[in-house]
Image (tube, rainbow, N blue to C red):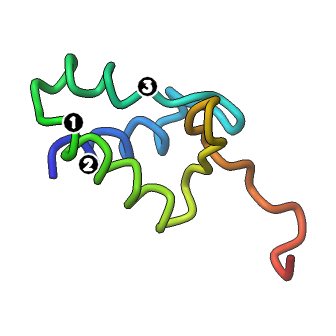
Amino acid sequence: MRVLDTLVAEIAEGKYAPGDPIPSDADLVKRFKVARETARRAVRVLRERGLVETEWGRGSFVKRAKQNPEE
C-alpha cells in the first residue's frame, strides 16, 4: 500500500519525530489521491505496528520509543 509504505519510510527517516502528528486522513486523501478508507486503513496499520497512537479528536502522533524495553 503506497500510503502506508510512504508513511513508514518518512517516520523511519525522521521526517516525523516522536510526538509529531502525522497528516490527517483528509490530508492523506489529498496528497495520495486515494479514498478516505485507504487513508484510514494505512493509519490503522501504523497503530497496529506500534508506530503511531491516535488521540480521538486530536489526531495520530508518532509514538515515542520506550526508554525501558521491558515496559
- At x 28%, y 48%, the residue is 4
Q: Considering the numbered disc 3 on the image, is that residue within a helix, a strand or a loop?
A: loop
Left or right of residue 26: residue 44: right
Pick whichever of labels 1 and 2 is earlier in the sequence.
Answer: 2
Camera-nearest label, 1 or 2: 1
Question: Where residue 70 sits: x, y (%)?
Answer: 85, 82
Pick whichever of labels 3 and 2 is earlier in the sequence.
Answer: 2
C-alpha separation, residue under disc 3 versus residue under disc 2: 14 Å
Marks 3 and 2 in Cβ contact (< 8 Å): no
User: In the picture shown, does residue 10 fall above or below 70?
Assistant: above
Marks 1 and 2 in Cβ contact (< 8 Å): no
Residue at numbered disc 1: 36
Q: Amino acid at mark 1?
A: Arg
Q: Quadrant of the C terminus?
A: bottom right
Most foreground residue, 19 or 27:
27
Camera-nearest label, 3 or 2: 3
Q: Residues within 10 Å of mark 2 (few under 14, many from 20)?
A: few
Q: Considering the numbered disc 1 on the image, is that residue within a helix, a strand or a loop?
A: helix
Left or right of residue 47: residue 45: left
Q: Amino acid at mark 2?
A: Asp
C-alpha separation, residue under disc 3 versus residue under disc 1: 13 Å
Q: Residue furthest front?
A: 57
C-alpha separation, residue under disc 1 versus residue under disc 2: 17 Å
Most foreground residue, 33 or 65:
33
Question: Where residue 43 sits: x, y (%)?
Answer: 39, 48
Left or right of residue 43: residue 28: left
Q: Amino acid at mark 3?
A: Pro
- At x 13%, y 36%, the residue is 35
Q: Residues within 10 Å of mark 1 (few under 14, many from 20)?
A: some
Question: Where residue 62 sits: x, y (%)?
Answer: 61, 42
Tell me the number on the disc at residue 23.
Answer: 3
Residue at numbered disc 2: 5
